[in-house]
Amino acid sequence: MGKNKNFANKQQRETNVSTKVKADKTKTKVNGGVFIYTGAISVGELSKSLNVPVGEIIKFLFLQGKMITINSILDDELIGLVCLEFGYDFEKKNIVAAENFEDLEINDDPSKLKPRPAVVTIMGHVDHGKTTLIDAIRNSNLVEGEVGGISQEIGAYQKECKGQKITFIDTPGHEAFTQMRARGAGVTDIVVLVVAADDGVMPQTIEAIDHAKAANVPVIVAINKIDKAGADPERVKTELMQHNIIAEEYGGDCITVEISAKKKQNIDGLLEAILLVAEMKELKANPDRYALGTVLEAKLDKNEGPKATLLVQNGTLKEGDYLVVGTSYGKARRMTNEFRKVLNEATPSTPVSVIGLSEVPLAGDRFMAFSEESEARSIATKRKLIKESQDRNATSAASLEDLFNLAKEGEVKNLNIIIKADSTGSAEAVKSSLEKLSNEEVKINIVRATSGAITESDVLLATASHAIIYGFNVRPDARTRAKAAEEKVEIRLHRIIYALIEEIEAAMKGMLKPTFVEEVRGQAEVRRLFKVSKLGTIAGCMVVDGYIKSTGGVRVIREGIVVYEGKLASLQREKDSVKEVKNGYECGMLVENFNDIKEGDIIECFEVVEQGK
Ligand code: GDP
């Protein structure tokens, strides 16, 4: 009977995109010299549509430095290049092809929408009680039989309050949140920000606020540890005001709840606050369509094979559905909830652990369910091809160059910027000068403006919000720079406000000139100081990254802040003057006209070169 019921349900559910697109044979066409297309296509297809021999296209792209074949899939950029080269204009129509289901905007008939549970992530500073709170919620009001049975492996769980469910993402902190968002998956509806009442607002509290704001997700503040003697909830609220989180009782719109996660006090109060915010957001979805959602966690299980926790965001996932996840596909063979209970179906906002996939997907991958295996297989294959070609042509998260190109094409653009400066005052100054630059074409959006060195957390936020990082008199350390290179985040460094403003203004007008850029050669750490009466203070250093050149420029960095910039008077190894010292070697450095060097300082060596050379 189960089978028949399943079959009947398949008939009832709306499909998401696949069949429609399949029926649409006119995926590409040429209309009055304009090539109209809907998504990535192969060289062969493009050749046919444009009536240009395949060889010509391959030759042209080869000259652009792209090695491709007739079956290579071209992305928008390459399609555009080819069209222009062969005398066509081009236009992308936003009919979402099944293989691009990330871009799908589902417009459900309002009458089919049903309320769905809110999806909540808990964030806050380390030791403020995130884990304790997650446990307190998980274990509160457990129905008999569930006690102790809840599995922590699934990465999310649901809790009931006043007959309504709330879905909690199990990994606290903003790492997971940001990584998901960096991959385009906004799964969180509400952020619960935990602030310890005896400690107040701390750096990671502020980071969490930045992340929530950048993602446009409402924040509920859980003022935790109110059982402690030093608890001062009012201080927390006042401190939060400096970061634009205004509590209701101070005339703002942020709900604050005083709790003790450890003593399990007022957990219900927090749950009720979540329900209130969820109600205001009118969270709804259509359960009568094939499921769409995001992978929360995945791993390879020794016995069961690839196992993934999926969060259904729209539609209903049923046992036996075929799934495309990331670039792989499979059948939802068995679905279980956080109590390892087998589920036949998972409705919107339900997290389920699923086995039956052919590969282990990545957290943050999107998934979509289909009724037919053949459909799922062909879409997964196509996605794999697209992914491979995208990886080859990987472009950066955001760069000033991109903005420049878009500005030239007259496209409206948001420019997201993270500012790190040597003091709060200058961060604010840079922020307000940049905000004034917003015009009709380009909106400047400051995602974060704080003082201090550029850190990996800034790079993460930049990846998530496609931002450029501007350092004003501050530098990234070697690790952060490596991370930025890996994530393709652009870091631009300036010492003078107007130079920074000029650069952005030029980019906004599409007039970025080829410039001289600075390339960092390496960094050395000052380990010991030697005072030599005639010369000054010689810094005994260890090169910790790259190499130091005697002729390059140097800057002295103290806790991420540039305290001096100039050049070397001498670079020595074992008393001999040398031209270069490599990573892992000791050396002595004398910075010209600067005697205030301290142990622990970083001396960074750089050279100025013409961009692109
Ligand atoms: P996390 O780093 O934010 O996940 O913080 P934890 O949940 O690990 O908590 C850090 C410490 O604070 C632990 O020793 C907890 O027992 C303690 N703690 C958490 N919540 C409370 C609370 O409400 N009251 C008190 N007194 N201690 C708490």
Image (cartoon, rainbow, N blue to C red):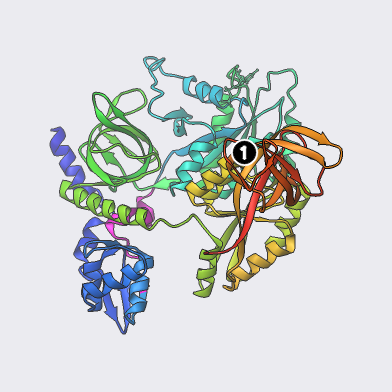
Q: Say which residue label 1 marks.
A: 543
Q: Residue type at mark 1: give it.
A: Val
State whether residue 227 is above or below residue 191.
Answer: above
- Mark 1, other Cα within 10 Å: few <14 / some 14–19 / many ≥20: many
Bounds of the magenta segment: 91-113
Residue 8: x, y in percent? 17, 43
Q: How many numbered marks does the figure carry?
A: 1
Q: Nearer the viewer, residue 213 or 255?
A: 213
Residue 241: x, y in percent? 73, 42
Q: Quadrant of ligand 1?
A: top right
Q: Is residue 96 magenta?
A: yes
Q: Would you say 200 lies left or right of 388 here?
A: right
Kindly identify the residue that appears in the image at 71 percent across and 48 percent down.
555
Quadrant in the picture for the N terminus: top left
Kindly identify the residue that appears in the image at 63 percent across and 26 percent down.
128
Q: Nearer the viewer, residue 73 or 605?
A: 605
Q: Quadrant of residue 253?
A: top right
Q: Residue furthest front?
A: 576
Q: Would you say 473 lies left or right of 54 here?
A: right
* Residue 247 seen from this side: no
Q: Quadrant of residue 577?
A: top right
Q: Is residue 371 magenta?
A: no
* Residue 477 seen from this side: yes
Residue 370: x, y in percent? 23, 47
Q: Would you say 526 lies left or right of 121 here?
A: right
State whether residue 364 is above or below residue 494.
Answer: above
Kindly identify the residue that appears in the image at 28 percent across and 26 percent down.
301
Residue 242: x, y in percent? 74, 43
